[in-house]
């Protein structure tokens, strides 16, 4: 398969030897040289259970600080960094921000005076269609003093990686550059994504599967997100971010019945959130909801099943307005329901008795 | 996931469009590149208003072996009054509700109007007016090497997601699609492939040459091999889709004689009964010379022309029959009547190595069969069927398989040195297994050859594969005789070796069978990509031992059967039977083929929770006219079959080569 593509490409090259692709290559030569000087290979823990023992990093200070991806590779005392010129240097982890998948290494040789990225002046931004180059130690194909591999492509999208429902099993949840080249390979994490002019865009992330579409996604974390933590870690002033306790504990605050909504029995993995019944006098009844309405959106987010609806309802804030969009026949109807001031917290040990009406078939957990 | 190093690529065509007045040698490359980049962005901006986001609610979480996603997918507006075309893949989960979000953020519930099952497209309708319809690139302007921009709306971003590549090839997948090296995946299936001028070349879909179905071809996502259905073709079928009828690939009911598809002439091998081809009078041996005005010189051209035709289309076919040339108009249909296997009723004697092939010696006659009724006897030698001379059992099987149930045939037999003509009427291949069946006893070789391969029970590795296997060859193995091969597919987390060996050893000795037990790489169960190992193992056994091709069967129990079924359908030319115990069939089997008989033996206890579904499996296979036997064990739960049923499987294997 790959051979066939290479044949097509080489045929194109052969038949158009005068074609501008040569000039094309030349125009990015300065960029490639400049970036490769600033990219390093990282070798550490792994090598068993299909865990790779290598990754990539980029130099962020002349004194020898390297930004890289936070992963199992760094979980060792024997961390080695191979510089662009092939020199091997011992390194230690100076600090990390697991929520950004970021770690900063300190090289143990102080006399290096390396070419380094300037995180203020060298950084740029890009949108869909911008041509980019990716540099990484993917698959460890670059051995000895060989330079890291270069891939080309375009920015496919600049979009949030994770939705609240966790489409991606990634610790990084912010906006990312998604690229159309297969940049995120084993060992590629910690590499860089740059424009063809050599401006730094982002750090290539880990291998990541999009659980919504069951495909691998290639992305880089924007430098704008990493700049501050990197600088603070180097300065020794960084404190790792705290996780939002609400998200980690995931207390289910509200349940459909509190609004008077009875859902159809949740029998399938993806039972559509059809309303089975509306309790008379409830908020749902006052808002005009009817049996057989299909709940499609909750506060603007798509509801793909009863399960998702209940999860989303569990996260809303007390005292706000619950905005639902339902499908009735061929029409989409927006409705608004007031959210009670007191959340339903049956799990809290202080309130052992369940304050709610007995659960119905539509309220299975 | 595959990584590929990109290489410089450029299209002359494009360069001229962009910088018509500047000589290439003097143009600064960086400037050219930024102009190109600008062009990608502008082209996508022109089409963006017509690219819609599609979300689905409810539906299956898994179709076959592909997990269906819940991510947003993409569609393209094809008419201002609310028609949207998308990839059928996006609706594989059969969602309860479909939502379309326009580029301006307006949201509409959508109706699925119809599907095109040939090009794998789905037409949606929303109640909206004044939508932005994109410009369509003319089909005759496509050039391999020109820029192609793939667009989708999977991400939560106001701008569509892009991937940039070139057109890699035209007329792929039997003429239905063009190929691109832009990264095509669920992130843009259903979205447009756009040229550098902002015209829609086609609509992105997953496709495969080897498989049909909504999820076929998904395994190639992001690989640099992606497909798009030309928009110009879609507009041609749009009026038919708008009427709400699904479009099916058109079939005429012929198979072509095997040969090099790129070199051999298209000679009709078989004509399916009651098919449009038969009704038009096409005959085996006819050479197809022209289809729909296109001259045909090679096999592959027939597929290329027919690949673009739908059920209901009428085509003209010119065939050469001897000296004459016959032209027929044929209206294609969407579904052919399944082939019903035919039966004469004889058990052919299995030839020893080196015996001359001068006809089929009858070893036994099955009671109440056409042969029994016509008084054919054991010891007779069948030498001819109607006008077809018969030298071996494969030839007799081929001749019988070309006739239909109920056909009158004349069987020429040699009996006691005299030739006799016997009339018989062919029946349906029966599926019940007789309670008693004498086996053809194989005597141990005398004297024992020096170079005998391994006999008895053994453990082995297969060169070039990580898996290993065990097996059993009867101690009396005689290389002059053909042996049946039973491939035991163990269930997850238990290879059951000791039990299987104890239970099957006497059956193998009695019925002349060799048993092999491949072991899954991970004890937890089989991975589908281990299929290649099983194929290699069977070929290895064929090389080392004298294996009768007609009696190679897969035997599985519980979830091991899933892999057994997969193998049987994947390697149709290799396996002749599947004996599946306590497990229903969960995938759609391929069509029954007259030339490759595939038989099924299902067994299940009536106390097994899966019993009803195993019964349904029998019904499904029978409806497709596969020969299928179901043996029910009273009182048995989800357990491996007991000896009487295993004996029955032994007899069933011994009957696989009945004709």
Image: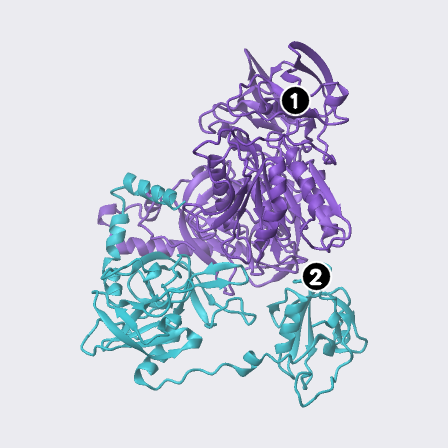
B86 sits to left or right of B644: left
Q: 10 Å neighbourhood of mark 2: few (<14), some, or many (≥20)?
A: few
The foreground one among B570 and B126 is: B570
Query: Is B230 placed above or below B425 here?
Result: below
Do the numbered discs 1 and 2 sit on residues whose CB atoms are within 8 Å?
A: no
Q: Secondary structure at mark 2?
A: strand
Q: Secondary structure at mark 1?
A: strand
Q: Give the colour in which the image draws chain B.
A: purple
The residue furthest bottom is: A350
B155 sits to left or right of A154: right
The answer to whether any part of residue B214 appears in the image is no
Task: Give the letter of the chain under mark 2.
Answer: A
Question: Which residue is disc 1 drawn over?
Answer: B362
Disc nearest the viewer among 1 and 2: 1
Residue at 36%, 68% (x, y): give it: A203
The label shown at residue B569 is none
> Within the image, what quadrant is residue A334 found in?
bottom right
Q: 10 Å neighbourhood of mark 1: few (<14), some, or many (≥20)?
A: many
B67 sits to left or right of A48: right
Screen quadrant of the N terminus of chain B: bottom left
Percent position (x, y) of residue A38? 26, 68
Q: CA distance from mark 1 to mark 2?
A: 72 Å
The foreground one among B487 and B188 is: B487
The foreground one among B378 and A8 is: B378
For the colour cyan, the matching chain is A
Screen quadrant of the C terminus of chain B: top right
Query: Is B154 placed above or below B444 here?
Result: below
Percent position (x, y) of residue A344? 69, 83
The answer to whether any part of residue A92 appears in the image is yes
The residue furthest right is: A280
The foreground one among B311 and B339 is: B339
Question: Which residue is disc 2 drawn over?
Answer: A331
């Amino acid at each position: 398969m790959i051979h066939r593509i290479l044949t097509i490409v080489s045929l194109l090259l052969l038949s158009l030897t005068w074609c501008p692709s040569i000039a094309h290559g030349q125009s990015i030569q300065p960029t490639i040289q400049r970036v490769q000087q600033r990219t390093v290979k990282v070798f550490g823990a792994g090598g068993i259970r299909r865990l790779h023992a290598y990754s990539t990093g980029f130099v962020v200070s002349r004194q020898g600080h390297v930004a890289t991806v936070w992963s199992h590779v760094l979980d060792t005392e024997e961390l080695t960094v191979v510089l662009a010129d092939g020199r091997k240097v011992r390194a230690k982890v100076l600090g990390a921000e697991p929520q950004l998948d970021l770690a900063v290494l300190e090289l143990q040789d102080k006399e290096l005076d390396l070419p380094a990225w300037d995180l203020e002046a060298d950084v740029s931004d890009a949108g869909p269609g911008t041509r980019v180059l990716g540099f990484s130690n993917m698959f460890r194909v670059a051995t000895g003093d060989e330079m890291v591999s270069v891939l080309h492509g375009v920015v496919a999208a600049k979009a949030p990686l994770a939705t609240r429902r966790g489409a991606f099993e990634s610790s990084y949840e912010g906006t990312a550059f998604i690229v159309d080249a297969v940049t995120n390979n084993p060992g590629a994490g910690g590499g860089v994504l740059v424009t063809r002019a050599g401006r730094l865009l982002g750090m290539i992330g880990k291998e990541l599967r999009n659980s919504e579409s069951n495909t691998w996604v290639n992305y880089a974390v924007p430098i704008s997100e990493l700049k501050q933590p990197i600088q603070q870690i180097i300065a020794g002033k960084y404190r790792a971010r705290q996780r939002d306790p609400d998200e980690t504990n995931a207390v289910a605050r509200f349940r459909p019945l509190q609004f008077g909504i009875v859902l159809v029995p949740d029998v399938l993995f993806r039972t559509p959130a059809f309303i089975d019944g509306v309790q008379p006098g409830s908020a749902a009844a006052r808002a005009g909801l009817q049996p057989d309405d299909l709940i499609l959106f909750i506060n603007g987010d798509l509801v793909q099943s009863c399960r998702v609806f209940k999860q989303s309802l569990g996260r809303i804030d007390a005292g706000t307005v619950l905005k639902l969009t339902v499908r009735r026949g061929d029409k989409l109807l927006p409705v608004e329901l007031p959210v009670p001031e007191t959340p339903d917290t049956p799990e809290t040990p202080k309130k052992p008795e369940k304050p709610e009406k007995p659960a119905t078939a539509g309220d299975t957990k | 996931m595959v990584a590929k190093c990109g290489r410089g690529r450029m299209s002359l065509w494009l360069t001229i469009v962009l910088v018509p007045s500047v000589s290439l040698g003097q143009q600064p490359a960086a400037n050219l590149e930024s102009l190109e980049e600008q062009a990608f962005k502008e082209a996508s901006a022109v089409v963006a208003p017509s690219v819609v986001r599609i979300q689905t609610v409810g539906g299956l979480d898994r179709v076959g072996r592909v997990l269906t996603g819940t991510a947003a997918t993409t569609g393209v507006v094809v008419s201002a009054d609310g028609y949207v075309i998308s990839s059928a893949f996006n609706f594989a989960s059969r969602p309860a509700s479909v939502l379309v979000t326009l580029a301006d953020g307006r949201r509409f519930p959508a109706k699925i109007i119809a599907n095109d099952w040939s090009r794998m497209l789905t037409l949606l309708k929303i109640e909206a007016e004044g939508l932005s319809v994109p410009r369509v690139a003319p089909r005759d302007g496509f050039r391999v090497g020109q820029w192609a921009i793939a667009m989708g709306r999977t991400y939560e971003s106001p701008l569509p997601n892009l991937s940039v590549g070139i057109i890699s090839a035209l007329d792929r997948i039997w003429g239905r699609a063009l190929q691109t090296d832009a990264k095509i995946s669920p992130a843009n299936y259903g979205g447009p492939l756009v040229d550098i001028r902002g015209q829609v070349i086609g609509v992105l879909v997953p496709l495969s040459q080897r498989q049909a179905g909504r999820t076929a071809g998904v395994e190639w996502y992001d690989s640099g091999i992606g497909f798009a259905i030309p928009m110009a073709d879609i507009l041609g079928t749009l009026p038919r889709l708008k009427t709400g009828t699904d479009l099916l690939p058109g079939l005429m009911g012929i198979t072509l004689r095997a040969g090099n598809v790129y070199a051999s002439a298209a000679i009709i091998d078989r004509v399916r009964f009651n098919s449009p081809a038969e009704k038009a009078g096409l005959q085996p041996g006819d050479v197809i010379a022209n289809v729909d005005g296109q001259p045909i010189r090679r096999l592959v051209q027939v597929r290329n022309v027919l690949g673009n035709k739908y059920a209901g289309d009428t085509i003209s076919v010119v065939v050469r029959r001897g000296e004459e040339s016959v032209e027929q108009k044929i209206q294609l249909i969407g579904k052919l009547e399944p082939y019903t296997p035919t039966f004469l009723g004889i058990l052919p004697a299995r030839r020893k190595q080196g015996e001359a092939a001068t006809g089929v010696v009858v070893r036994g006659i099955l009671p109440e069969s056409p042969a029994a009724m016509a008084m054919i006897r054991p010891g007779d030698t069948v030498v001819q069927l109607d006008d077809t001379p018969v030298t071996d059992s494969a030839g007799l099987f081929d001749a019988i398989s070309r006739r239909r149930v109920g056909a009158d045939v004349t069987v020429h037999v040699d009996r006691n040195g005299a030739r006799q003509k016997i009339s018989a009427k062919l029946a349906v291949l029966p599926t019940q297994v007789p309670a008693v069946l004498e086996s053809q006893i194989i005597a141990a070789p005398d004297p024992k050859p020096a170079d005998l391969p391994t006999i008895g029970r053994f453990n082995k590795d297969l060169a070039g594969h990580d898996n290993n296997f065990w097996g059993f060859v009867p101690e009396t193995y005689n290389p002059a005789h053909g042996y049946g091969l039973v491939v035991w597919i163990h269930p997850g987390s238990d290879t059951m070796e000791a039990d299987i060996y104890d239970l099957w050893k006497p059956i193998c000795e009695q019925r002349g069978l060799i048993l092999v037990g491949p072991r899954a790489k991970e004890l937890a169960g089989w991975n589908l990509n281990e299929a290649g190992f099983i194929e290699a193992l069977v070929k290895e056994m064929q090389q080392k031992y004298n294996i009768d091709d007609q009696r190679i069967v897969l035997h599985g129990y519980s979830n091991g059967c899933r892999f057994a079924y997969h193998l049987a359908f994947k390697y149709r030319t290799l396996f002749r039977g599947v004996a599946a115990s306590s497990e229903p069939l969960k995938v759609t089997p391929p069509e029954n083929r007259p030339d490759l008989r595939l038989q099924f033996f299902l067994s299940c206890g009536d106390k097994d929770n899966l019993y009803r579904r195993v019964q349904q499996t029998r019904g499904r296979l029978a409806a497709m006219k596969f020969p299928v036997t179901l043996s029910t064990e009273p009182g048995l739960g989800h357990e491996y079959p007991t000896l009487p049923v295993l004996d029955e499987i032994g007899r069933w294997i011994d009957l696989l080569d009945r004709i």
